[in-house]
Structure formats: structure tokens, C-alpha cells
Amino acid sequence: MTAPLPRIMRALEQFHATHPWDHNAHYHRWILRQLPRRFNSALDVGSGSGDLARLLASRAGAVHGIDVDPTIVARARELTAPAAPVTFSVGDALKEVPPGPYDVITCVATIHHMPFSDALTCFRQHLAPGGTLVVVGLSRPQSRSDYLIDAVAVPSNVVMAWIKNKGRKAPRTASMTAPTRPATTTFADIVRDARQALPGTRLRRRLFWRYTLVWHQQ
């Protein structure tokens, strides 16, 4: 069952070279729907070029993004208006998070680069009472349902790429496509570890090689 996957992923990479779209940004509006209309502070872990951090700033008094890549952090600062209530830093989110607590913590396509349980514990410690944690993550397919969802994602992915690129005379020069670094943890293990670290957390498998996790600090 796993043999066709490398060929499929290579085909997707070739397709997205000319029809790119951002799988992670696809979930940004969904993330906002999980959050209060207004909140004081937010932390975006693995902030990349800052798209989500700037979106959070439309509701927050202050947003901080942290990423390990100094080049992408520099780009995020360039793209952010000086008056925006958004700051960025280079660092390890498990060791160098600026002092909180934060009303909102987001983490998109980043947690699979970290020790999962340690990351959730760290986020919980930096979350304010009543705060919300939202994770969009990657998992390694294992079960029949995992492979079924991934199989459905392939044609859906192509359709979305066509829709988002419709009418463009030239392709975008940069985009997030299917995951470039595969996740090593199965969704079943993620569910088990998340429920141990964050009782009451809500998890769901999603299209486009993602799952979501939402948790509210009591």
C-alpha cells in the first residue's frame, strides 16, 4: 500500500512547480475561527515569513513570531509594516520563547520538527488561563483510514491548485506544497500523547496531509 506514495509525492512536486499553492495558508482562516474576536497577545511558533502572525494581528494587541531560520525571519520583518503590532525573533521555541503568558499560541506545520510531548508541555506552560492553543500538524500515515484520507487529498490537491492558479499568466515563484520533510509520528500516537499532555484536546485528521489540534487552557 505504501509503494505508490513516493511516486505520487514526486508527481505532486512536479505539478506544484507550475501550479503552486500554500497548503498551510489554506488553514489560516480556519485557525481564526477557533479564536476569540479580540485577545491581548499571541505567539506563532514556526512563523516563517509571518503570514499567520500578521493575520493574528488583526485581532490581537501584540503578536510575536519565532522561527529557527534567520533568513525567513528577516523576510518576515521586511514584509511587516512598521506600525503593525508584530515582532519576530530567531530561536528554538522550546528554549527561547519570550516571556508570556499568551492568550493564543499557534503552531503550523512545525511541531513535527520537535519532541511532540515536550512541545505541548511547553506551549501549555506559556498559555494564559482561558487561552487557546491551535496546532496544524503533519503525521505519518499508518492505518487504512490514514491512507484513504491521503488518497482523497491527491485529486483534491490538484483541483485546489488549479482553482488557486486559474487566470494567472505565470506561476508563483514560491509556495508551500506537500510536506518536504516527512513526519515520523503516526496520528494514533499523536492522539495518545496529546490527550496525556492536554486533557480535553480536540484532534481531527484533515485533507492535504494535515491534522488539527485545538486546546483551551482552564
Image (cartoon, grey):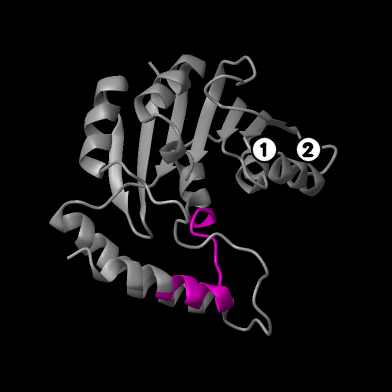
**Callout 1 amino acid:** Ala
Count residues near mark 1 (Cα–Cα under 10 Å), then give few for <14, some for 14-19, many for 20+.
Answer: many
Q: Position of residue 130 (x, y in %)?
A: 45, 19
Q: Is there CB contact under 8 Å for labels 1 and 2?
A: yes
Of callouts 1 and 2, the N-terminal one: 1
Q: Position of residue 9 (x, y in %)?
A: 38, 68
* SS assignment at label 1: loop
Instruction: Report the residue marked by disc 1.
Output: 57
Residue that extends furthest to the right in the rendered view of this protein? 82
The span shown in magenta is: 11-26
Q: Label 2's element?
A: loop
Relative side of 154 to 69, left or right: left
Residue 155 image position (x, y, % from top left): 34, 75
Name the quarter where the N terminus is drawn: bottom left
The image position of residue 148, as x and y in percent, is: 20, 63
Considering the image in quadrants, where does the C terminus appear? top left
**37 falls in the magenta region:** no
Q: State the residue position of label 2.
A: 84
Q: Relative to residue 167, is residue 198 depicted above or below?
A: above
The image shows residue 61, relative to residue 50, as above or below, that is: above
Alpha carbon separation for disc pair 1 and 2 = 7 Å
207, 89: nearer the viewer: 89
